[in-house]
Image (cartoon, coloured by chain):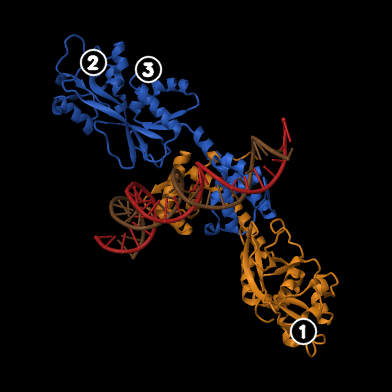
Chain colours: A blue, B orange, C red, D brown
Amino acid sequence: MSEIDWKSLPALSSLRAFELTARTQSFAAAARALNVTHAAIAQRVRSLEADLGVHLVRRAGRTIALTEAGQRLSRHLTEGFETIAAGIAEVKADEHSKPVHVTTTVFFSQLMLLPRLEVFSRECPDIRVSVTPTQDIVDLTSQDVDFAIRASPTPPDWPGMRIEPLITSDLIIVGAPALLDGTIPPLQDLPWIWTEGSETEEAVLRAFGLHLETLRNADFGVTSYHISLVRRGLGVSMFPEVFVRDDVASGTLRQITPPTKISVTFYAVTPVGPVRPQAQIFLDWLKQNLGRDT
Amino acid sequence: MSEIDWKSLPALSSLRAFELTARTQSFAAAARALNVTHAAIAQRVRSLEADLGVHLVRRAGRTIALTEAGQRLSRHLTEGFETIAAGIAEVKADEHSKPVHVTTTVFFSQLMLLPRLEVFSRECPDIRVSVTPTQDIVDLTSQDVDFAIRASPTPPDWPGMRIEPLITSDLIIVGAPALLDGTIPPLQDLPWIWTEGSETEEAVLRAFGLHLETLRNADFGVTSYHISLVRRGLGVSMFPEVFVRDDVASGTLRQITPPTKISVTFYAVTPVGPVRPQAQIFLDWLKQNLGRDT
DNA sequence: TTGAAATGATAGAAAAAGTATCATGTCTGA
DNA sequence: TCAGACATGATACTTTTTCTATCATTTCAA
């Protein structure tokens, strides 16, 4: 089909007013359907008639009737607008049924997200959530990700992203009870588990007054295993308090309050632009529930 | 198909902007096609995305690409808008091809309109004209009449009608040469031809100082025949000068300047509302040419 | 690395659409 | 046949929407 010459089309609002007028056979009814006054409709229809140079509606006292031209035009308009409305409905429905897509670290998803998802799905059964654990920061705009969750000591400033704090937690040091039985040796003498080369981790260790050069490291190279290594008594490590709250409460892990108080905040990172309602709901729910026990 | 829920539809102008953006794959190109700035388009598309809560366009530096949802929506939009555009084109084309429809008296159409139509159709070959001679004033709005031509001594005030003077002409008295040979007898003694009972005609006769009670009348009852009766020498009568200018010039009729000068104006009467361009052209042409010789 | 051509952002101007109101016309039912 | 409900007509004024003008930033290509 040929291209549309938009410049020669009348105002779309006039077409809409006329379409409704035609279907309802009344300015007043059309006005009600659009939540405007009858005058607005009448003006729009008059302007359409003037644009086309054609009488579309025959006014006869209290009632109106379409002219022959009006009837033909209205048939086209109804069909066209219905096509458009159907397309919008389709996109909306589709968008609604898609799960909320969150991406975060393996760590956060394992310890914080997954345990809470069951609760959320009970509270909001019609909102599905899918989590993609990634170590790297994925390109949120090109992937279909609703938001990411990232840790940072200070609010990050990423252009084109909306940043929202989710939860703040102090970093604490934990170890297996076996390792920390009786009197606790100086931190410097304990076996540690950290990602060698990670600037943020090492900066924190230094802030705790440790000397990395002489510190033992039992790391295997996979950050997400650290928690299991610690649980198995292979060393101590630091985590946000909320990550290990359950372990500490149940006695699986024992907590050492570090000499320096350092906290980390987890931020929700949303691409600029529209946020899907479901995503917002889940995000709000997270804010409420991340601090609570599972 | 189900009714359209207009209230849940986004702004139509946003849909239009997006449709063009989708087809041109560029805000800038869409802007050019609509004769607006790129900012206008970008704003509209952003607002559409916000309305739907869906990303439709993926911005990547200097280029853009549609998301999957954007592609699906754009297909619907293009189809819908094309349907609408086609309907408008159809109505316009149809309206254009219809002849200009004029209604007036038999008299005016015979003496003034028909002789000039040939000239007009030579000058504007693509505008057809149809004349419906009627004595009565037809309902212009319910019939498909572009305009009527009516005579009146003063500008008439018809509600719902646009009145435009076409030509003004003095009423003169004419008779066949045979009847007015040699010395012309007093008007009161001549045989007259007028529509008995017509208030306007009789008022004019009285204004000429004639006494109707004693005036001879050769009327047959059909006003449009008067001119032939006069030509055949059966009596004298009064006409707007322009009606009989040719007769007088050619000597078919002889003119008597009446004692009182009375003029009559012919008005074009157009129903309020849109005027078709062709009708306006013909009307303007008439204004220019009614005063000229045929 | 410089210019052309996109998009992004946004305050303020312009245009479009709508409201409020009053007038008029026409059915309907007491 | 008269009042009242309900429709359209007309229009000054207000509100909302849309667009412009402008400047910044990004990208691509010569």
- Quarter of the rendering containing residue B273: bottom right
Q: Is residue B46 above or below residue B258?
A: above
Q: Secondary structure at mark 3?
A: loop
Q: Chain of mark 3?
A: A
* Amino acid on which disc 1 is placed: Leu
Q: Chain of mark 1?
A: B
Q: Is residue B108 above or below residue B89?
A: below
* Amino acid on which disc 3 is placed: Thr
- Quarter of the rendering containing residue A270: top left
Do pointers 2 and 3 mark residues of a single chain? yes
- Does the CB distance between marks 3 and 1 fall below 8 Å? no
Do pointers 3 and 1 mark residues of a single chain? no
Give neighbour class at mark 1: few <14, some 14-19, many 20+ (Cα, 10 Å): many
Query: From the viewer's perspective, is A30 left or right of B26?
Result: right
Q: CA distance from mark 1 to mark 2?
A: 127 Å
Q: Is residue B209 above or below residue B83?
A: below
Look at the image and tell me whether residue B111 can be seen.
yes
- Which quadrant does the N terminus of chain B fall into? top right
Residue lying farthest to the top in this orientation = A182
**Labelled disc at residue B253:** 1
Give neighbour class at mark 2: few <14, some 14-19, many 20+ (Cα, 10 Å): many
Task: Name the spot of residue B83 as percent of width and height, x first.
Answer: 61, 52
Q: Residue at x 46, y 38 (%)?
A: B53
Task: Name the spot of residue B73 as percent of width and height, x first.
Answer: 53, 45
- Which quadrant does the C terminus of chain B fall into? bottom right
Query: From the viewer's perspective, is B179 left or right of A177?
Result: right
* Amino acid on which disc 2 is placed: Gln
Q: Which residue is mark 3?
A: A294
Q: Residue at x 64, y 73 (%)?
A: B167
Give neighbour class at mark 3: few <14, some 14-19, many 20+ (Cα, 10 Å): few
Decide which of tag 2 and tag 3 comes sooner along the chain: 2
